[in-house]
Image (cartoon, coloured by chain):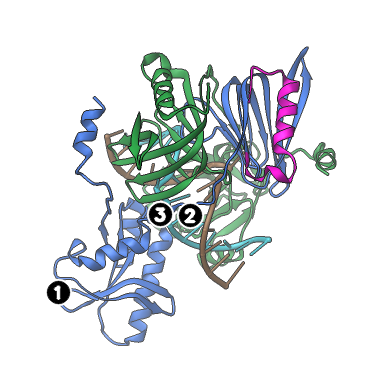
Chain colours: A blue, B green, C cyan, D brown
DNA sequence: CGATTGATCTCGAGA
DNA sequence: TCTCGAGGTCAATCG
């Protein structure tokens, strides 16, 4: 860790900690006044300002401004990273240069001052375990079909068809078959096409005047999607699954006053 | 900046630098062994491991593992952040707790050891200037319609229809109306549907035997998309905007050997 | 390897 | 405030 180092010192430091095979677990953090230039699938320029830059040994580079959840500039993993010093306008600069070929893109992060640079060996073999995926929502609806429609009864889950797997299959209160397609995020037109394919497939297999309902179930339903559904004689339900517990919301709010 | 501080010291440090109105420009960086719990739109758990955590004064919290371009856990801007110490299993923990109401989600980052904590005042009023967005490509084509087709004349940009906004609208050399949909990245089936909707909408409004052409313009055109376009009597043009300079690609490659 | 799909997407424009 | 579409989307999965 160095405080207010010269460009040459940062350069030496970065090379020392991020080069070689032993650096697999290492991460570099640089805080200072820099500008950023990106050329690749698009092109961008960011003028001088204080930022936090993270370089990971897998090649990821992240440039964070003081605001915003996303990096203002970045390179993805498997990018080649090199450290340099540059002489510009009489002052010396520390440069993080990153480059990759597919697609061809490069990024320059040029520091005119560095407040702090530090390297850290991160020992970490854990991966994120996440709950609330589409399958979990299917579980929830199987457990309580009433959230979709009164009198609905689910008979199959992940029912296989030649078009793929139907999320849920059942019958409504009038004994009419219902095909339900579930999306945990905002549905796309392809979700409508998918549902339509299931319905058509079911009608083909049960040749005759069998009526089949198709319902798209998602947390939101854009107008374009509603139009597509209506055109295809399909239905929709807006359903969102919340995981937040209400119990400590109150006490939490009090704490934040 | 503190090296190997106790949980109480980190807590005091974080509070001191991140509280109050003067901290608007401040960013906190914490490196250490932590675990993360998230509950909200989904739910997740991440076991103990070394990570880099960034807290911005706009409320953003980012948890980065040693690999990957995206944070493993995060909270977006406008999240409320509080620092605490917790006693767990005989050891003391430093905790970054963040919470927001819409949508309700919370995240706990619990540190059992902290290698380094630092706070930085980032002076930065610059915003990213980006070139090559979809609108820039639309500009480019407006300036030189010939890249799409000889004799094409553009009459409208962002022309509003009931189905949404058409990127470009014009007439070809035979005075036949042309609707152009532009994608800066690989087109999806929904782009075809969108274009089809515009064409149908135009035909509905101008009832009669008015012929309208629809052209999808993108940097690549997968076979499936070509099939869909053909089925819908639509056309396509492959058009890509290059930004990469070839000049230093060679020298760059040599440097990385 | 490219093609497709989901995401705690993020972010910004427009109603 | 909410909706909706674009993104240097990213990242995982599938053929």
Query: Which disc is residue B195 wearing?
Result: 2
Badge 1: how crowded within 10 Å, few (<14), some, or many (20+)? few
What range is drawn magenta here?
A1-26
Q: Chain of mark 3?
A: A
Badge 3: how crowded within 10 Å, few (<14), some, or many (20+)? few
Q: Mark 3 sits on what residue?
A: A130
Tell me which corner region of the image, top left, top right, bottom left or bottom right, holds residue A161: bottom left
Q: Position of residue A135 (x, y in %)?
A: 36, 64
Q: Mark 1 sits on what residue?
A: A173
1 or 2: mark nearer the eye? 1
3 or 1: mark nearer the eye? 3
- Asked which secondary structure carries label 3, the reply is strand
Q: Residue at x 56, y 54 (%)?
A: B215
2 or 3: mark nearer the eye? 3
- Asked which secondary structure carries label 2, the reply is helix
B25, above or below A242, in the image: above
Same subunit: marks 2 and 3: no
Same subunit: marks 1 and 2: no
Sequence-first tag of 3 and 1: 3
Q: Chain of mark 1?
A: A
Left or right, A233 with reference to B94? left
> For residue A5: magenta?
yes
A119, above or below B46, in the image: above
Tell me which corner region of the image, top left, top right, bottom left or bottom right, holds residue A250: top left
Marks 1 and 2, how far apart in space? 39 Å
A62, above or below B22, in the image: below
Query: In which quadrant will I find the N terminus of chain A?
Result: top right
Marks 2 and 3, how far apart in space? 37 Å
Q: Residue at x 56, y 49 (%)?
A: B175
């Amino acid at each position: 860790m160095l405080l207010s180092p010269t460009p040459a010192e940062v350069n030496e430091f970065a090379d020392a900690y991020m080069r070689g095979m032993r650096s697999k677990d290492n991460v570099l953090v640089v805080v200072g006044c820099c500008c950023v230039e990106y050329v690749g699938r698009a092109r961008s320029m960011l003028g001088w300002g204080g930022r936090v830059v993270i370089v990971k040994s897998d090649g990821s580079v992240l440039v964070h401004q003081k605001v915003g959840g996303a990096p203002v500039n970045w390179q993805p993993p498997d990018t080649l990273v090199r450290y340099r010093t540059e002489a510009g306008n009489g002052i010396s600069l520390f440069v993080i240069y990153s480059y990759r070929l597919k697609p061809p893109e490069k990024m320059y992060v040029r520091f005119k001052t560095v407040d702090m640079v530090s390297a850290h060996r991160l020992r970490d073999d854990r991966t994120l375990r996440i709950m609330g995926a589409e399958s979990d929502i299917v579980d929830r609806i199987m457990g309580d079909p009433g959230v979709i429609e009164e009198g609905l009864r689910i008979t199959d889950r992940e029912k296989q068809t030649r078009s793929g797997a139907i999320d849920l299959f059942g019958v409504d209160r009038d004994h009419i078959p219902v095909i339900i397609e579930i999306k945990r995020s905002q549905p796309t037109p392809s979700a409508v096409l998918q549902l339509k394919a299931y319905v058509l497939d079911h009608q083909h297999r049960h040749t005759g005047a069998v009526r089949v309902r198709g319902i798209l179930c998602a947390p939101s339903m854009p107008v374009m999607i509603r139009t597509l559904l209506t055109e295809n004689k399909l239905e929709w339900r807006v359903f969102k699954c919340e995981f937040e517990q209400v119990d400590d919301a109150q006490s939490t709010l009090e704490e934040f006053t």
